[in-house]
Amino acid sequence: MRLFHVSEDPTIQIFYPRLPARQDLDITKGLVWGINERCLPNYLTPRNCPRVCFHAGAQTTEQDKRNYLSTASHVVVIERKWFEVLKNTKLYLYEFDSREFILQDDNAGYYTSERMQIPIATFEVDDLHKALLAWNVELQIVESLWEIHDEIQHTTLNWSMCRMRFAQPRS
């Protein structure tokens, strides 16, 4: 299994555990976060870009596949105002040795380690749209994320919502 950390910072040499801000985790244990390859496309956007991401999982019905997936196996939905930012953002994928990580959330593809991590490889991604296409991801552009945000939660798809605090306000 391959695990990555995605950043706009090309200079990271060591990842130190940081205390989580999430209240569902032990806030006294620092963690290094990694994302698996299956969910990596959810992070091929600018860091603060709000997005709704989804793909078929083991429990996904044929009806949901027909309704939400086209020829791509994975969808990332962003707001129109973020598309220019996406086109002009460069990302760095830091790959980790996965042996010291444990599964934190299978649906989201999150793995964590309580130990500092030194990347085993670094990859530059200078064309995010092209990278998404290479991962068989459909990039959808919408004016507002809130409709798909509310809708996708009632499907059998595996979904993830990131940075929604930066989304356009609900109208």
Image (cartoon, rainbow, N blue to C red):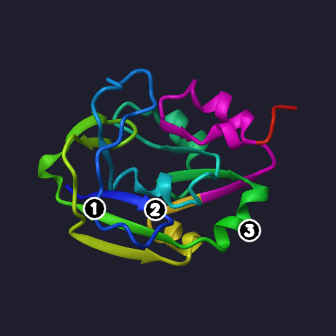
Marks 2 and 1, how far apart at CA: 13 Å
Contact between marks 3 and 1 (CB within 8 A): the answer is: no
Q: Position of residue 107 (x, y in %)?
A: 37, 36
Give the labeled residue for mark 1. 14
Q: Amino acid at mark 1?
A: Ile
Marks 3 and 1, how far apart at CA: 31 Å
Within 10 Å of disc 3 (Cα), the crowding (few <14, some 14-19, many 20+) is few
The extreme left residue here reads 99
Residue at the image position 32 percent from the left and 58 percent from the top: 4
Identify whether 126 is placed above or below 146.
Answer: below
Residue 84 bears which disc, if any?
A: 3
Residue at the image position 82 percent from the left and 32 percent from the top: 170
Give the labeled residue for mark 2. 7
Residue at the image position 28 percent from the left and 62 percent from the top: 14
Q: Earlier in the sequence, mark 2 or mark 1?
A: 2
Q: Position of residue 19 (x, y in %)?
A: 36, 35
Image depth: mark 3 or mark 2 in front: 2
Residue 129 bears which disc, if any?
A: none
Residue at the image position 55 percent from the left and 48 percent from the top: 69
Q: Position of residue 126 (x, y in %)?
A: 53, 78
Image depth: mark 3 or mark 1 in front: 1
Magenta segment:
139-167
Q: Earlier in the sequence, mark 3 or mark 1?
A: 1
- Looking at the rendered structure, the secondary structure element under dot 2 is strand
Q: Is 144 left or right of 165, judged from the image as shown?
A: right
Does the segment drawn in magenta span residue 144?
yes
Within 10 Å of disc 1 (Cα), the crowding (few <14, some 14-19, many 20+) is few
Identify whether 74 is placed above or below 147.
Answer: below
- Quarter holding the N terminus is bottom left
